[in-house]
Image: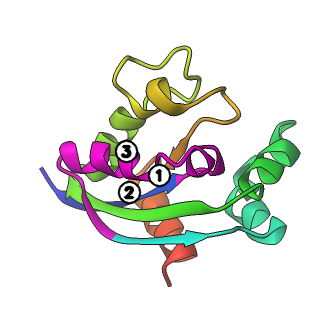
Amino acid sequence: MIIQKTLSIIKPDVVRKNKIGQIINIFESNDLKIFNMMMSHLTEEQASKFYEIHEKKPFFPDLVKFMTSGPIVALILEGKNAVLKNREIMGNTNPKLAKPGTIRYQFASSIDENAVHGSDSILTAKEEIKFFFN
């Protein structure tokens, strides 16, 4: 098992619901340490840049609009196999398919407003961490 760092974002829907502490508690209860965190309100330019991999997909404009609709909390999580562990804790992107106990099962209201983002690989984690924490 390797100690890794990964990025997680608590999205505007959860911030609006005042559930930040509950999400952080889930990370910490699953042996992921908060290495760094910040609250920010993304601009359209920042959200477009961060999600540029989805630029040609039909949901891109709505994604950017959602991610700029309120503050987000960006976190660097650290722990054993942090990338995979965080993905497991988050659950399926579609909360209707997410396993009970996962963040998205508990807090997401739809596939579009799905509570959290998490890096999908070690390489992506490094790039995404740099995006928020240079």
Mark 2 / mark 3, whichever is N-terminal:
3
The x and y percentages for residue 62 are 84, 43
Q: Earlier in the sequence, mark 3 or mark 1?
A: 3
Answer few, some or many: residues within 10 Å of disc 3's Cα (few below 14, many 20 plus, some between 14 and 19).
Answer: few
Q: Between residue 91 and residue 26, name the one nearer to us.
A: 26
Q: Residues within 10 Å of mark 2 (few under 14, many from 20)?
A: some
**Magenta segment: does it hold 16?**
yes
Q: Nearer the viewer, residue 44 or 121?
A: 44
How is the model colour-coded? rainbow
Is residue 56 among the parts visible in the rendering?
Answer: no
Q: Residue at x 78, y 61 (%)?
A: 48
Foreground mark, 2 or 3?
3
Q: Horizontally, is 128 left or right of 67 in the view?
A: left
Tags 2 and 3 touching, CB below 8 Å = no
The image position of residue 134, as x and y in percent, is 50, 84
| Magenta span | 10-35
Question: Is residue 120 located in the magenta-colored stretch of the structure?
Answer: no
Q: Amino acid at mark 1?
A: Ser
Check disc 1: other Cα within 10 Å, few if <14, some if 14-19, many if 20+: many
Mark 1: secondary structure: loop
Q: In the drawing, what numbered circle is on residue 22?
A: 3
**Is 32 drawn above or below residue 41 in the view shown?**
above
* Three-letter code for the amino acid on which mark 3 is drawn: Gln
Left or right of 128 on screen, residue 68:
right
User: Which residue has dot 2 on it?
Assistant: 122
Amino acid type of the residue that numbered disc 2 sits on in the rendered structure: Ile
Residue identified by numbered label 1: 119
- Kindly check if marks 2 and 1 are in contact, taking CB atoms under 8 A apart as contact: yes
- Residue at image coords 38%, 57%: 122
Which of the two marks, 2 or 1, is nearer to us in this view?
A: 1
Q: Is residue 91 above or below residue 6?
A: above
* Label drawn at residue 21: none
